Image: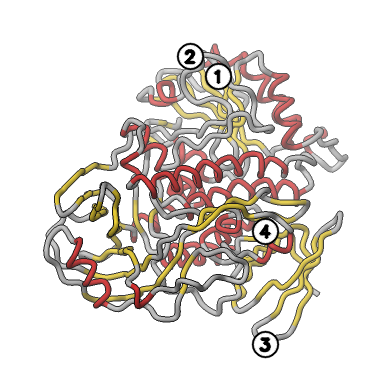
Amino acid sequence: MGHTDVLVVGAGPVGLTAAVELRRRGVSCRIIDKLPARLPYAKAVGIQPRTLEIWDRMGLARAAADVAVPMRGQLTYVDGAEHLRFDMKLPPEVPYGFAALPQYETERLLEEHLARWDTRIERGVELVSFEQDADGVWNRIVTPSGGEEEVRSRFLVGCDGAHSIVRKALGLSFEGGAFPEEFMLADVEVDWSLPPGYGVRSTHRRQDAPDDVLVCIPLPGRSRYRMSMLVPPELSTAGRTADDGVAHGLEGDRPPGLEHVQAVLDRLAPEPTTAAALRWSSVFRISHRLVNRYGAGRVFVAGDAAHIHPPTGAQGMNTGIQDAVNLAWKLALAVAGTAHPRLLDSYDAERRPVGEEVVGRTVRHATAGGVQADPEDPATLMLREAQLLVAYRGSPIVGPRAAGLHGPGSGDRAPDCGGLVGTVARFPERLFDVLRDHEGHTLLLYAEDTGSFGPLAGLVVETQRRTHGQVRCCAVLGADARPDGLLGLASRHDSRGEFRRLYAARGPTAFLIRPDGYLGLRLTAGDGQRLAAYLSGVFGAPRRPSLSDPAGG
């Protein structure tokens, strides 16, 4: 019988993210997948800026940026005429843009990153059942040879897709429906003269409703795209359904050929073009469903096991990756025995509303003609599609947001900024550089000068007393401040005033940044009780130092 802290089921981008986030925090983890090898399919291809921010903190963003292709915008055509062209622009302080990368490349990068912690996918291994008790989970798995093994884990995370065995065995509902249309996907090259880096959406309308559609997303390579289009009658899988009734994902045993792709291009391409170099194709169906709970007891679901929806706007995989990041840091504290007993309940409280919003929005966009049909102003629309507006305001583990506050507050994403200069290293850094090498919370204190820093010192003392080093404390000072008297804290100077501007810091202010890059609290010098309440809600009661604990004196 094997033992592990966490068993992760499913080695797609979501499961791999969960495993990386656990292993880099020192949590033992096994990750299994029933497939014998990584699938060479360009299914999920859009990489949102928020995902790249997450990968930055994981140390993976540079490798991903080196192989991804930038997404610059979208060209929309209706009945052969250009209808709309929009550029995917973000504010200059956002460190990453939109990108595209085949799913198999995303999985390769994550798998190689996971290997740094001497952890590898156990392929051809399937979870067949589990039972949980007060202390852990008994998992029964089948190995590639057909033999059975029992694995004892403290927690179980199901990242096993739309037909999740974990979700079914846990007895969770998965309400929703299916779109009547069938689609085909194809990874091909074309010889048109359209500008690189732009997606293409072309439709034919009849009686003000589209009856034919072509959507093309650029991929790395010369004039290479992942195309989706309606299925011709001869490839239809109508009448077939999965055993669980969830019509979602790749289906059919006859993949589309170049001739099927070419027929659609002949009807809908903005200019005459020829498809070539078909790498992969498939028929697929789309459903929209949301689980009623993201977990029960010691068992959780994430990604497609919890929410499925149309691929419009490339939201699904990216939302699942954020599920995994949100859950992993909380599981790490639970495994270490330093989490509040109800900390894990916040996973459902924070992520289920996000899943509900994404399902609703993507269904609306799919039926209304794409993201550009959204009534929001273009700047807000781009921030939302980039997943930079995801927030946890009202979460049981973040503080209340101050009335009339300008700038990020409790529950909001902690934005990046530049121009931070240290006392020894004189080159400017980004805030994300400062946060990258720490897996836990960071208490970031801001003051214009050392003299005004003094009132914040009590927050540092309270943090250190309650967490015994689990929260790192550091300071950001005005450009000309002297770094004296900072209780030995590492400090940076806000040389260009970007931190002060982006965080709307007016006077001494503290920001408690969670491991997933969100603000747990925004504090002023007199907020010691609020800080104590937050730390108790995450870490539980203060630890009693042992005689061997240096913090005990």
Q: Where is residue 196, by image quadrant?
A: bottom left
Describe the element under mark 3 as helix, strand or loop: loop
Viewer-side residue, 243 vs 88: 243
Height in image: 476 above or below 215?
above
Instruction: Using the rendered image of the protein, determine whether residue 489 is visible from the camera's viewpoint.
Output: no
Q: Quadrant of the C terminus?
A: top right
- Mark 4 or mark 2, which is nearer the start of the sequence? 4
Residue lying at 15% horizontally and 57% vertically, measured from the top left: 270
The kind of residue on which mark 1 rests is Thr
Left or right, 510 with respect to 2, comes to left
State the image coordinates of residue 275 (x, y, percent, origin top left): 20, 72
Callout 2 touching callout 4 (CB < 8 Å): no
Circle on res. 145 = 3
Circle on res. 509 = 1
Height in image: 89 above or below 282?
above
The kind of residue on which mark 4 rests is Val
Residue pointed to by mark 4: 157
- Mark 3 or mark 2, which is nearer the start of the sequence? 3
Instruction: Using the rendered image of the protein, determine whether residue 60 is visible from the camera's viewpoint.
Output: yes
Label 4 packing within 10 angstroms: few (<14), some (14-19), many (20+): many
